Each structure stands twice: as C-alpha cells, then as structure tokens.
Amino acid sequence: MQLSQKLSLLREKMNERNIDACIIPSGDPHLSEYPTAHWKIREWISGFTGSAGTLVVTKNEAGLWTDSRYWLQAEQQLDSNQIKLYQDGKEEVLSVVDWLFQNLEPESRIGINNALFSVEYAQELTEKFQRKQINLVNDFTAPQEIWEERPKMPTDMVTAIPDHLTGLSRTEKINQIKEVMKKNDITYYATGALDEIAWTLNLRGADVPYNPVFYAFMIISNYDIKLYIDTHKLSNHVSKKLTDEGIKIRNYEQFYEFLNCLSLNSTLLIDPKRTNMATLSAVSTNATIIQDDSIISNIKAIKNETEIDNIRQTMIKDGIAMVRFLSWLHKNIEKKAITEVSASKKIAEFRKEQSGYTGDSFETISAFRENGAIVHYCATPDNDTKLELNGIFLLDSGGQYITGTTDITRTVALGNVSQQAIIDYTLVLKGHIAIAEAIFPVGTRGAQIDILARKELWKNGLKYDHGTGHGVGYYLNVHEGPQSIRTQENPVTLKPGMITSNEPAIYRNGEYGIRIENLILCVEIMETNFGKFLGFETLTLCPLDKNLICKELLAEEEIQWINNYHKKVYETLGPLILCDCQEWLKEVTLPI
C-alpha cells in the first residue's frame, strides 16, 4: 500500500470519529525501544525505520519528529511531499505539542492509543492540551486497524537461565522487591517493562529484536506474583517451575481485568515512565495509585558479583571476536571486495564462534566515510557502500551472550586520512579517557561528569548531540536505565555495580563519523575523611586505532592511559587468539 493510500485511509477513520489529529509513537504497550514487527505502526505508515520518532497526522498535514541521531536517515526515507521532517531538539523547531497548538483550534480532538504512551507522557499531554481547550481521545486505534497485512505477535518459547549465571534466584530477587514494597506500604506493584520481568524471573525470550525478552505483564503483591503471558510460550517444565515457586500464570489479556478489581484500601505502585497509560486507566477506583521510580530497575542496574565476573569473561570473548575482525579487515581491504554489509556479517560470524553467543545486541552500524555521520546508520543491500583505502570506517556493534551484553564502537583509518580527521579522533579520545579516569564523590549524577567528555571538543568549537553514556543490561537490553551520562539532568546517581557506556563522538556531515565506545563499571576507588569516592573500570577489551591519534595533542597521563589499556588488551587477549592475528594485535598495542 502506498503512503498516500495509508494516509487517506487513516484520515477517513479520523473523520468517522471526529478526530482532528492523531499522534503515533514508535513503541508497543511495553514501551519497548525495539518493538516486534506487529507494533511497528509508525514505521509502516511513514516508511521511516529509525527506532525513535513520532508521527503526527492532521486532516491536511503530516509531520515526523525525531532526534539528531536520525535526522539524516529520516531525510532519506521520508516522502517530504507528504510527511514533513521536524528535527526534534533544534531550538527553532516546534515540539509536537506546540505544533499542534499552532495548527488546531480550541475544542479540537486529538486521538491516541493510550496503550502506546507512557503514563508520564500521556499525563503531560492531557495537562497541556486542557490549557488550550483541546481534547485528548485515549482509545483511538485506527492506525493499527488500517494495517490489513499486519504481522502476528511472536510465538517463540521462553527459556529459563540457571541461577549460577544470574547470581540470584527468582525467589531471592522477588524477596528483595517485596522488602522494598513492605517498607513503603505497597500492596501491589505492576510492571509491563519486559526487561524487568525477564530479570526478575530469570527467564529470557525472543519476542523483541536484539533484546532477549518476551511479551508479558507482571504484578507482585504481598502474597503472590502473577505473570500475564501467552501461556503457549511456556514449556511444561518452565510452567511447573514457576508454579512451584508461587508464580501464578495468567493469560496476557487478563492483566487489565485484574487491575479493575483491586480491593479497597490497596495501594498500587507503577513507574510512570515505564508503564503505559492504559494500565493507569484500568485501575479500580478502590485502589490508591503511587507513581514512583521502578523498584526492579533500581535493583537490577547494580550488578551482583556473579554478573560482574561473568561480564568480564564475556568481554574477553567479545574482544577476541573484535580483534579477529579488525585484523581480518586490515589484511584484506586491498585483497578482496568488502562492503558495509559484508563487514557487518563478518563481525557477526566471529561472534558466533564464541561460546554462549545468542545474537546481536542491536542492529550493527557499519558505516564508511560520509555514512558514519549518520548516527544510527543502517547499511542495506540498497545503500551498501564498498570499503576502500583512504577513508574512515565506523563499526558500532554488540553481542548478546548468556553471560552478558556487549556494546562497542571502534573507528578505524583505512589507508591515509586527513589531518582534520586525526585531530577530531584525538579530541574524542581525550574525552573518552577523561570519563574513564574520572573520580567523583558518592552521590554524583551522570550529568555532572558529562562535561568531561565534551570539554576538549567544545574548546575547539565541536560538539555531538547524543548522550555520552547509557546503562547496559546483563544478557538483557543494551540500553538500560535508570542511570545515564548526558547533558540532560537525571536525578539517578552513579553507584558501584552499574555498567554504563562511554562513547563521545564527532560527526561531520558528508565526510565521516568518529565514535569511541567502551563499557565501564562503576567501582569504589577510595574513602577519605571527605567520604567515599567512585570511578570506573573499563571492561571492553579491544585496541584503539593508533593511526588516528595525534600524540602532540595528548597529555602525558593520557598517553599513559592508552599504553596501559593496550597492555591490558594484549596481555588478556594475546594468549587466546589465533596465531594469524596475534602478531597484528601485538603490533597495534605497542606503546605510543
């Protein structure tokens, strides 16, 4: 179906219900970053495949809002004659709400499917629209109804992972959660966040691309746990184990029904950022609703000793795969045809040879020259670019292993590159080292150290618009909260056991992109009369490209950090890799 037909059908449905505009987000009822195909409604209508974006359709216009990571991609994918791109985050660009204010009259009606909006966002919209006498219609599902050949929901089976890999049993995790509930007089705790459910129950699935999770809701109370799921996804063995441990299995569709029957004087906790508005709307008026941060997210963000030990081992496996790939790339760039797509497939091949590997942790970004300036570039057979000498290649990739999740970016020079590129790379590297070496007091937030990554770039009139660091799950979502390192304020403090990415960057449109990403573990460094101080242990093991480093721009301690890091990489990985790339690794990790 053509875009014009989709928009025409949607507008017909809007007219039937007297809807003046509708808002179509990117997610599913669980607010997933990577929804299954069944829920890619915004993508199906607009043609834009980025993971973040909001489509707004009125009777006469349509616009798509997306952040800086996707501006170039959206320009390429959208039909600008029918859908206008709004570069969200630019000072001069109106937000979705302000644009609707400008384009709608008082008493207009805006349709949304409240199952696809977080409580926080839906409440914000309601409050703002009420001020302008604009009405929000919460049950508008026409965008999905016009999708005649909509893919079915996934039916993959759920699997259990053993306690010796998780460090804590289901019962131990549930008891931790219940202890927090008890302290705060909470009767029920509801969550639809898929990573929270998978972590709590030590289960994994394959419903969502790249994240080993499954579609379900969960309610924890003082006396039992209810799991709402397509029961066909549970084997008899898994079902019995859950039942034996006091977990009641219910049909997926019964979740909202239970909420409507909560008893008098009960209290229900939901995280407004991670819970859809349909959940809140379904809650019985008998219950008191508490909107607060997720208990589970706060617990699982701090990895236990078993998880940390396993992740360190996982980094060795992933490092071996990356070293083999980089060695292969440099040895074959002049000998055989290598493209962005074939390079992406090659790193996946090397990871597949590592024990415990189950798949990629996100869609690999394999970008050569100007494609690297597209922050979330995706190489396809239609836009596949050949890798050649005298250009910069950026590879952002990661793996899911039963012992952890990885995410790494390396930028490499293929042949000769400009002095400007070398300077850019070095400035990015200085910011990367500044984060890696940071020492800060307990109670520090990510926003307070983010400047360390950007300082050298800003001094030279350069910047990047995305965050410097995101949390990473344990054989779960590659993007995990609640912590972050970014300019935007986040009240969550950095704590020992949290794993975060460290990925400053620079992008020059039409030329190249440079990003250096390692995963870092927050650890306690020292305790003085002034209190405890924290820092980071770099977990990722993979050489940096010394050909892109301008030594003259580095301070002595930065040179020492690079040499120490490379020494660790070689001493850890050298004895474990094949002879054909052992010499290459030795050469590229020699001191600068």
Image (cartoon, rainbow, N blue to C red):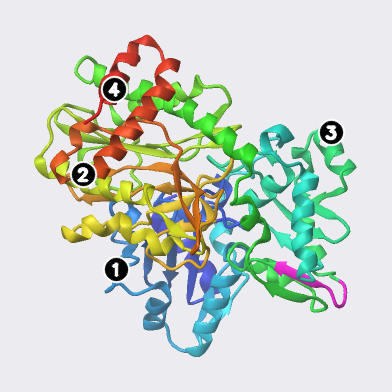
Q: Residue at x 38, y 56 (%)?
A: 467
Disc marking residue 196:
none
Q: Are marks 1 and 2 in contact (CB under 8 Å)?
A: no
Whether residue 196 is visible to the viewer of this picture, yes or no, is yes
* Label 1 environment density (alpha carbons within 10 Å; few <14, some 14–19, many ≥20): few
Residue ID for mark 1: 90
Residue ID for mark 2: 426
Range of the magenta residues? 263-269
Q: Does residue 266 belong to the magenta stretch?
A: yes
Instruction: Indicate the amino acid at tag 1.
Output: Lys
Upstream in sequence: badge 4 or badge 3: 3
Upstream in sequence: badge 3 or badge 2: 3
Q: Is residue 422 left or right of residue 494?
A: left
Name the residue at the top extreme.
579
Residue ID for mark 4: 329
Q: Is residue 554 left or right of residue 140?
A: left
SS at badge 1: loop
Instruction: Tell me the distance, in whole angstroms, between the alpha carbons under discs 3 and 1.
Output: 53 Å
Instruction: Tell me the distance, in whole angstroms, between the alpha carbons under discs 4 and 3.
Output: 47 Å
Upstream in sequence: badge 4 or badge 1: 1
Residue ID for mark 3: 236
Residue 477 lies, in percent from the top left, at 55, 45
